[in-house]
Image (tube, helix red, strand yellow):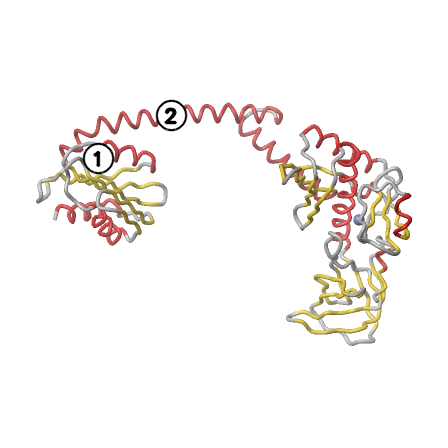
Amino acid sequence: MTEKLFENDSMLKTCTAMVVSCLPKDDKYLVVLNRTVIFPEGGGQLSDTGMIDDAKVSYAAEVNGEVIHYTNKSFIAGSQVTVTLDWNVRLDHMQQHCGEHILSYAFWKECGANNIGFHMNNDVVTIDLDKELTEKDMLKAENFANAEIWADKPVHINYLQDTELTKLNMRKKNEKLHGLLRIVSIPEGDICTCCGTHPTSTGMIGMIKILRFEKHKSGVRVEFNCGLRALRDMQIRNSTLVATGNLLSVKVEEVPLAVAKLKEEVLDLVSKVKARTMELFTAKVPQLLQEAETAAKGCKILCIAESCDAKEAKALMQLLTAQPQVIIALVYQSGNRVNYQFGLGEGAQGNCKDYCVAANKIFGGKGGGNATFAQGGAPYSEDWQAKKDKLKALMLG
Ligand SMILES: [Zn+2]
């Protein structure tokens, strides 16, 4: 059994220890010590990182009461070593983990919602609650939880027999736990069984900020951050908001209204441009038909090049396929692509699939379809207009 010094002193950053065993595994070594300050992953809390002498400990796990340290160097059993904790990682984990205790307590006490799931990784912390909640509930729980932090209450660690738990007003009772249990309690606040590391007082958590929440199963999933993570998040969000306000020449609190107005203007412009484009295309059709060359079978071959988007191309194609006895090849440049579409006007004889195969070869692209309609595309190339002329010559036979 490894003596887990973090269980009674979460502030201890270093200790001396003796190597019990060291086994190679893949590109790592699994090191067991007689005691350690490094917390192994467990109970929803992530593993600490740190050093054993000058070897990096990237991960630790607990197996049958022993803490297995994953290192990049080997050790000789029986040797004396110094174990050092990566304190910034530990503090971050304690802030998120203990913050989760307090926020879960706040939802339980203020909103009658129970925590039924918890997830923490290096970016995000989430809790799942068994009840649907509102924006107002989020604010209420967040304010309550932060008040618990500012009260800077001590976080107590005690050990009690499972039979004694009934005396406590706990939000979460785990019936499966038996024997001597580790109880983490905050005076007039949260009480729960937990094996993790906790700050000595709630003030060390700094702050709790709910980032968003969404419906999850029959309740909600709440995403939040604590401590330094919360501060960093707010710094990024604030600078983003200030920069957006500057771009729109409005105050931060006026950004949503300004963006909504801008969106309305853009949508209005898009519909105006669309209408004008259709007018332009309609006006262009007679001239395009006049310029079209007649192929051997008597159909007119209309091979045109445009710079437009897919929606405009579709609209133009619809206008042209309404014309009689015409075979249409529409080549259009859109962004960094050159696309091509083939269609047949009323009564026209031709095979669009064959034209598309030819275009695939000329443009070095991909595409297909059937006899009456086919389309494809290729990466943009500067000579796309010349390729269009080559395609036209081929279609004219
Ligand atoms: Zn805990």
Image point 25% across, 42% down: which residue? 373
Image point 67% across, 50% down: which residue? 121
Label 1 sits on residue: 321
Q: Is residue 351 left or right of residue 217?
A: left
Q: Residue 201, position in %: x, y?
A: 85, 44
Q: Are marks 1 and 2 in contact (CB under 8 Å)?
A: no
Q: Amino acid at mark 1?
A: Thr
Q: Residue 290, position in %: x, y?
A: 13, 32
Residue 130 falls in image quadrant: top right
Ligand 1: does it lie within 8 Å of the C-beta at label 1? no
Q: Residue 143, position in %: x, y?
A: 76, 32
- Judge whether 86 appears above or below 34 on screen: above
Quarter containing the N terminus: bottom right
Q: Considering the numbered disc 2 on the image, is that residue within a helix, a strand or a loop? A: helix
Between circles 1 and 2, the one closer to the viewer is: 1
Q: CA distance from mark 1 to mark 2?
A: 23 Å
Q: Amino acid at mark 2?
A: Ser
Q: Earlier in the sequence, mark 1 or mark 2?
A: 2
Label 2 neighbour load within 10 Å: few <14, some 14-19, many 20+ = few
- Judge whether 80 appears above or below 44 on screen: below
Residue 17 falls in image quadrant: bottom right
Mark identifier at residue 41: none
Label 2 sits on residue: 271
Q: Residue 260, position in %: x, y?
A: 52, 25
Q: Considering the numbered disc 1 on the image, is that residue within a helix, a strand or a loop? A: helix
Label 1 neighbour load within 10 Å: few <14, some 14-19, many 20+ = some
Image point 76% across, 65% down: which residue? 63
Which of these two is toward me, 76 or 191?
191
Q: Is residue 6 left or right of residue 387?
A: right
